[in-house]
Image (cartoon, rainbow, N blue to C red):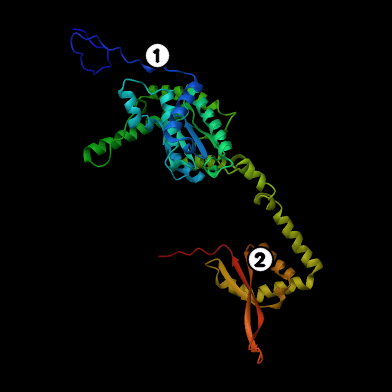
Amino acid sequence: MVMSSEPSGASRLPQGRPPKRPKPVVEDLEIKDAQIIFNSVWSEIEQEFGLEMLRFPKEFILLGGAPGSGKGTHTRFIQKTRGLTCPSIVVSSLLNSPEANKIKNAGFMVGDREVVGIIFRTLLDPAYRDGAILDGFPRTEVQVECLKLLVDKMKELRAQFFDSSLRVHFRQPTIHIMVLFVDEKTSVERQIKRGRLAEVHNDEARATGVGEIVELRPTDLDPEAARRRYRVFKEQTWEALQSLKQTFFYHFVNAQGSVQEVERNILNELRYQSLLELDPQTYDSLRNLPLASEIILHARQDLVKRLDAYELNQTELFHQVIQLIREKIMPVVVRHAISGLATVNIEDALLHDSEALAMLIDIFSERGYHAVVDLHRIEIPECVDPESGKIQCRQKKVFRITIRFQGSEIRRG
């Protein structure tokens, strides 16, 4: 009898027929040329989706981290910080997807080409149109190069559709590399602690039937295995992410501290920067408008100068405004001390002077309030022209002053 060389689990061939050739293992034949892999994947998805539908996310956050650095813990905070509502794309989960399992069940390994194909198709989901967090990609040099080629293609598509009605779907891509880092000692301690907690949870779940069994990795139980996992990260994923440092925005986050400390570090790294994130044409249109941070830089000094000038150069008007505030506005403000919001309607002729209005706002600012003045013009009927029957009105000016400030917190209940 002739034995088949099919992968394990395959049925025997009928007697008298030659055996089929064994399916090649991807390790033996896998192409490691990023350009060839990318072109092949791109050709497939272009045929599958159509060029006009190759609409990738505006923003990519490539989240990498040492084992135990808290990627799972901090992903939700990163999503909130960037205003992303879609779940993160966890590459290890994608490699257990039906598509990946089909590849593995056919006797193949999920290599770079398969990973890139699965990732690209996932990114085309409309749910990720504004941005996506990629947890665990890229992990190899080939995947790094494929990512760079994807960004180049996105820029080409943007140029191609720029003068069409579809231009809004092909935006300037923004790529952030975010690496959460802990040292080897911390990594091993956290991995083992996670394993112990998972064991306790699983024992309780089995005993009570309440809760789901948590998957335990060998590295969660064996300190030496945990150390090996950390070193693999340093040798492979760390190197791959470092190679992107010169191309994209790179954020190195110290994840050694408490959750609150790490979140502060993440927030500092991801602060909005229009020059880095806006389309260059959009940025050029806005750049001549001053930033809030620029105009507030010397705001206090400018306020002091104006108030001193009022006192020295417009003394009488300045003191009239102070008296108006003290007698007609502050009594209302005091009554609203708990809420921190007061609205006062005034018809005083003093406020018809624009200089007086400016003084009023500056005085409240100096005292720690935020004042806004709205002018309401109300037509008041006075008489009727007997010949034309036309109603003659006078215009009444009412100044509505809204004052906001820190209210008083009181205990309730």
Q: Which residue is the site of mark 2?
A: 364
Q: Label 1 amino acid?
A: Asp
Gap in angstroms between the C-alphas marked 2 and 1: 77 Å
Q: Quadrant of the N terminus?
A: top left
In the image, residue 77 lies at what x, y percent? Answer: 47, 43
Q: Label 2 amino acid?
A: Phe
In the image, residue 307 lies at what x, y percent? Answer: 74, 63
Outermost residue toward the bottom in this view = 386
* In-front residue for pair 218/104: 104
Q: Residues within 10 Å of mark 1 (few under 14, many from 20)?
A: few
Reply above or below: 45 against 24: below
* In-front residue for pair 7/48: 48
The tag on residue 156 is none
Nearer the observer, disc 2 or disc 1?
1
Give the residue displayed 75% in from the left and 70% down from the top.
318
The tag on residue 28 is 1
